[in-house]
Image: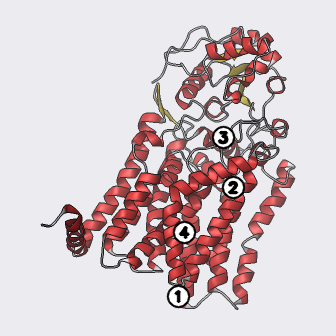
Amino acid sequence: MPTMTTQLPVLLGRLQRWLEHRPWLLQLVGAAGVLTLIFLQFRHVTLDARLAVPGGAWYWLDDDQMISMRYARNLAQGHGLTWNPGEYVEGYSNLLWTLLMAAVHALGASDGHAALWIHGLSALLDVALVVLALRFASHFVVLPALAQVALALSLAACMDVAYWATQGFETTLLQVTVLLVLDLQMCDHRRGQVRWLPYAIASLLPLIRADALGPWLLVAALAHVQGKRQRKVYVYLGLSLLPAALHLLWRHQYYGAWLPNTFAVKVLGLQDRSLRAVGYLQRCVGAYGLPWTLALLASLRRADIRARNLLLVGGAALVAYVLATGGDGFSHCRFAAWLVPPVFALAFVAAVQWQSKASWPVLALTAVIVLQSGVVRGGQLDSGNGVPLDSARVAYQLKQRAPANSSVAVIAAGIVPYFTGFRAIDALGKCDATVAHLPARQSTMIGHGKFNGDWTLRSQPDFVISVVPAGLLLGALRDAQMGRPLPQPEHRYLLAESRIFAGQYADNGVPMPPTVTGVAVFAQRESLGKLKALLQESPR
């Protein structure tokens, strides 16, 4: 008597044959899946990254991306690529993405709606990513309709695609650019020609991310395999590094440093770098080890030198970069994200080549990808970085009640400085070169281990904003005065170590609406007196 185990492959085979004769249905399913993920992203925007204010709403990106948005707005307003006008510190590492943000502001987007434009751009890039991944796979094998849909859904559901797009990171642009260059290279190889266009686009990679050497090496690896004995290929590769060299010279002239200030914050003096790197690589292997291994084994078995070089060079570049930097302060695998689309595409190519008549390898691979690295629930796309909703509410209150020439010291440096427009001091050093070069504290998050509260408050800003409730911060302050260590994570309680905060701010809490529960605002006594007496109704 047939069992479920013996019948399942038969049923799957029938389903595959039925679907193969109805490609329009598969395309519809794939498109619906991609659009569903985009819908989830916009659901996050409209429900979780939105503050209703009188006459409209404020939208935001991840707090780190709002730092780039402040640089972009200042550029559009004629203040240069600065966080505070007149102060030249490179607190971003995504020049081209910041310039796109500046274009959005220059085109007339309001402060409250500029983030919506970036979300829309990210959604378009998501669609382009899926299309380019399918084209990339087609250079190796003609994927059956079921495999095409499976690849599209796997990419759309992948956390390292959906999350970074939802939060407005440049990561999606980097992924799309890598795939576009690889596709153009393969098209040229099939036609027996070498054009300048792929390498001109590849020259943008280090401008999208200042540390995008890994993606460039992926392009170089494919160029080497396909362009052997063609001098023109290597000339174009060399010329593709020219914009990066010019950017390096411009950075030194404009900011007085050879590397972004973010490099100093995150990498210089980092404690336990090797241990952190191993942990980060373990996370990447747990998320993407199976599709990468499957694709590599298939390339070795069939002597596919293009796929093999892409996988080996990409993997080596990722490992080398993580070992050099210690990993990332964000969850997921942002540093591996540029490698995810070609790896997924090659994994599905391998699954199809392995069992071209069976559907179960494709379905099994899809299931593994979704379970290991997929968006299982919508809440996974939310970010608590910088306590965003409370920060937006605080920004609204200060913008309504404080003078326009006020200054503010912040630990979360994105949302409040952007929406208030106040002169801002970044306590964690992304926009403060002195803090960025302090010794890194042990066992702190990457990018959050350098701070000195007294230095941050030396200019006596009007307001100081914590990222913990007032009760917890003042409790940590009392403990610090008694010689006890700061609670973990230390950067959230850095103000408790500051004598200036204890003497001039701690007793001057600024009343906020009861909806503001996760952060606290403190003021100098004189600044507290300048606030409008009427507490504004809290926006939703």
Q: Amino acid at mark 4?
A: Leu
Separation of marks 4 and 3 at Cα, in angstroms: 28 Å
Who is closer to the viewer here, 423 or 493? 493
- Does residue 375 lie above or below 7 as drawn? above
Residue that numbered label 3 is attached to: 67
Q: Quadrant of residue 321?
A: bottom right
Per the rendering, the mark at residue 179 is: 4
The quarter in which the N terminus is drawn is: bottom left
Q: Quadrant of residue 408?
A: top right
Per the rendering, the mark at residue 190 is: 1
Residue that numbered label 2 is attached to: 322
Residue at horizontal 68 percent and vertical 38 percent from the top = 445
Say which element carries label 2: helix
Say which element carries label 4: helix
State yes or no: discs 3 and 1 in contact (Cβ < 8 Å): no
Percent x, y of residue 297: 52, 74
* Residue 220 left/right relative to 164: right
Separation of marks 2 and 1 at Cα, in angstroms: 34 Å
Q: Amino acid at mark 1?
A: Arg
Percent x, y of residue 66: 62, 40
Who is closer to the viewer here, 501 or 99? 501
Q: Amino acid at mark 2?
A: Val
